[in-house]
Image (cartoon, rainbow, N blue to C red):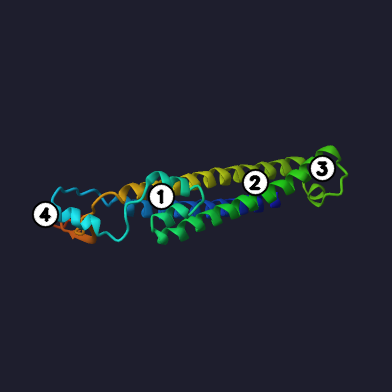
Amino acid sequence: MWFLFLRKSNSVNVNKLQNTLIVCLLMAFSLAFTTSATAQPFLSNNKETKTKSNTRKHPPRNPKKAMLLAMVPGLGQIYNHKYWKLPIVYTGFAVIGYFAVTNRNYYKTFKNAYDCKVTNPKCDNVLAKKYDKATLKMIRDYYRRNMQLSFIVGGAWYLLQMVDANVDAHLSHWNISNNLSLDVAPVIQPFDLPHAPAYKGISLRFKF
């Protein structure tokens, strides 16, 4: 019982850490994706706009080429000159890879112990001697589930960085207004009713 309580406590902590890191990575990549996506198109047919588009720092990128290059993680971001996204991409793969390998190693360890316990109750496996079949099976299934989840998240992360590269390449064809900005400021607004507390919030203002 003590082992089960300790194992459950450790499992909860590991799950919280893994979920927190995955959420943080998704939020970071979503923020990067949103930063690119908020550059909405402002098209104009006048000569001044055409002149500015011709003197841009980098020429428009090919979305298909960006997608193909993104099959190697990071190359799509390099092709789009979004070098600041590389740490996000590679950190995501490193964290997901760590959890995938760790869970896979634990899964194999407890799987071998469980198989040994089932086929030969007197086997020399240390874990098989220490725990019963039900406990070994429960721990094996736990790490197998986490391993499979890590592989799924890794595949989703791979596809996400490809989509990001493709979207960035598409946005490079638009003329972006230099006046586009987002102002974030706290707001404290009192109510009209007497003795009523003021409500607090955040103000978002788009300028273009």
Q: Earlier in the sequence, mark 2 or mark 3?
A: 3
Dot 2 and dot 1 residues touching (CB under 8 Å): no
Is residue 145 found left or right of 187 in the rendered image? Answer: right
Tell me what residue is drawn at x 41 percent, y 53 percent.
Answer: 29
Q: Are marks 3 and 4 in contact (CB under 8 Å)?
A: no
Find residue 192 and name its label: 4
The answer to whether residue 150 shows anywhere in this view is yes
Distance CA(mark 1)–CA(mark 3): 48 Å
Among the two numbered marks 1 and 3 on one chain, the one whose residue lies closer to the N terminus: 3
**C-alpha distance separating marks 1 and 4:** 50 Å
* Other-residue count near label 3 (Cα within 10 Å), few / some / many at <14 / 14–19 / ≥20: some
Gap in angstroms between the C-alphas marked 3 and 4: 74 Å
Mark 2: few, some, or many residues within 10 Å (few <14, many ≥20)?
many
Determine the CA span between mark 2 and mark 3. 18 Å
- Identify the amino acid type marked 2: Tyr
Residue under label 3: 116
Where is residue 32 shown, x and y percent of the image? 37, 55
The location of residue 1, given as percent across then percent down, is: 70, 49
Tag shown at residue 165: 1
Most foreground residue, 1 or 122? 122
Q: Which mark is residue 54?
A: none
User: What type is the residue that disc 4 sits on?
Assistant: Asp
Q: Which residue is mark 2?
A: 143
Give yes or no for contact between labels 2 and 3 (Cβ–Cβ under 8 Å).
Answer: no
Percent coordinates x, y for residue 156 in the rendering: 49, 44
Mark with earlier residue (2, 4): 2
